[in-house]
Structures are given as C-alpha cells and as structure tokens.
Amino acid sequence: MHPSTAAKTAEEKAAAAAAIDAAEQQRLEAVRATGLIGVEAGERLDRIARQAAQIAGAPLALVSLIDEHRQWNPGVHGEDAPREAPRGFSMCSAAIASPDPYVVPDASKDPDWADVPGINSAPHVRFYAGQPIDDGKGNMIGVLCVIDTVPREADAELLQTLADLAVWARHELLSGRVELEGADAEATTTPSEEQPAADASVSTGQAATDRLQELERLQSLVVSTTAHELRTPLTVLRVHADLLAAAAAELGPEERASLDAITRAVTRLQDVSDGLVADLRGSAGGAEEALRRWLQLEEGSQRIRPIND
C-alpha cells in the first residue's frame, strides 16, 4: 500500500471513530437527561413491562436505559428481573446499535451470548426480543424487551406489539426530562410583567403535549390488548369450531345449529377485531376518534351489537 493511501485510510478511520464517539456522547447525554439512571420509576414503567410480558407470554420483561457502564432497568416485570446489569453482558446494549428489533431465539446456541453470565448460569436466558427506544432525536436511549428461559421465535405480531408499547415507554422515560427542562427554565427566568402570559403559554403547550402523549399511550395499549386478549381466544374458538365442523355428520340438528351460530359469531368478532386494530393503527394519532367511531359516540359509527341472527 502506498504511504499516502495508508495515511488517508488512517485519517478516515480516526474520523469515523471520532464521529462514533460524538454520537455516543450525545446518546449518553440523552440517557442522563431522563433523570432515571439509578431510579426505580415505579408503577408507570413497571406497568409497561408487565403488559409486554403478558402479551408475549414471557416470564421477564424490562424497560431499560443504557449508560457508559451498565444497563439500568427503571421498569421491570418478573421475580428474577434484575434492576441492573453490566453493559458488557447486556443484550439491550447490543440492541441499541440499531433502531430495528433485536431478537435472539436461543442464546445458548448464539456464539455472541452462549458464554455470558445469566445465559450459561441462572436464570439461563434463552429467548430475547427487544425494541430499541429513541428520544425522538435519533438517540437510542434504551430498550423494551421480553425474555424467556426457553428458546422461541418472535413473530411479526409480537414485534409490532413491542413497537407499539415502546412508544408508550418513550413518553414515560422522557416525561421526567421535560419536567427538569421546565424547572431549569423557571429557575433562570427573571420575573417580569410578561411572566403570567408566558406561564399561560407554557401551561397550554404542556397540556397539549400531555394530551397527545395520553392518546398515544391509549392507542398503543388498546392495539396491543385487542390484538392479544381478543384475537387469541377467538382463534382458539375458531380452531375448535372447525374441528367440530369436520365431524358435523355425527352431530344432531340442535348441535349443528349451535355450531353454526358459534361459527358465525366468531367470524363476525374476528372481523370486528381486525377492523378495530387496523383502524387504531391507521389513524394518525387518532385513538380517540377511532374509539368514538367504534363505540358509537358520534353519528355514522358501527358499534358492536349482540348477534341475534
């Protein structure tokens, strides 16, 4: 290699390393700005972890933040769920390298993780699925993840649910940052005659932001709950109805009539479920409008009614 080419390559590597360092510093500043490193945030984040675990059917779920040296979990669900772990042993640390979901079907067979504590020792983690959480400015500050002690695959529905809940988690993680920034602004403001008007403007803006965040939380929660809590039992009912239909010749007239009624009801409810989920996901922040339409709170709605036919 020509000396000038080698020097150019070294300069490019140095520039790339500097850019990575700058990006990491910016990310760490975003993490620190949450004010939640070393803090147990309580029910508001534990609730999200619990919802994710229930939907995934997994024993453990975490809402994590990743700083220089560790993974801190302000939101946890599960008896063995840790509050913190060294960053070097953290799957969440690997997950924040990209905004895409990070999935490890069987950590014991993964060369990157097989020898890591917690995988080759208790609690013997096998399955991991994590959705990175950004701060709205491209900084991956943490991860919402579900963890299991048996190998599994992550289907598209689970990954979509994690993505929906991660939006909720992001707002909860950043809510403290907004309050801190507001407190700093208030502390450095000089009292004046215009202060009441400014306070009113800030209050109005904050109220609008809080309302939007609440609607997005509602949207994520309704979508994920509907997709799991309604679709799953409906699928079970449909499978058993199909099994009975296969043996319809052995059923009496009353049993066949009951089977037909069950099949019609399940089919209709599946259509309603699919339509509701699609409507909620498709609305541009319109969880409230979609719910109003489906619950017949405005003209032209299609509220679900008892099936009498």
Image: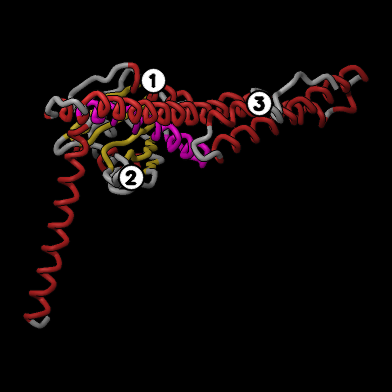
- Residue stretch in magenta: 151-180
Give the amino acid type for the residue marked by disc 3 in the picture.
Glu
Residue 230 picture quarter? top right
Q: Which residue is mark 2?
A: 110
In this view, the mark in front (2 or 3): 3
Residue farthest to the right?
A: 253
For label 1, the crowd category at 10 Å Cα-Cα, with few meaning under 14, some 14 to 19 and many 20 or more, is some
Task: Find residue 47 and name its label.
Answer: 1
Q: Which is nearer the N-term, disc 2 or disc 1? A: 1
**Residue at the spot of label 3:** 298
Q: Dividing the picture into quarters, in which one does residue 39 lie?
A: top left
Q: Amino acid at mark 1?
A: Arg
> Closer to the camera: disc 2 or disc 1?
1
Most common SS among magenta residues: helix
* Number of residues whose C-alpha sits closer than 10 Å to that of mark 3, classed few (under 14), some (14–19) or many (20 or more): few
Q: CA distance from mark 2 to mark 3?
A: 53 Å
Left or right: residue 81 versus residue 161 is left
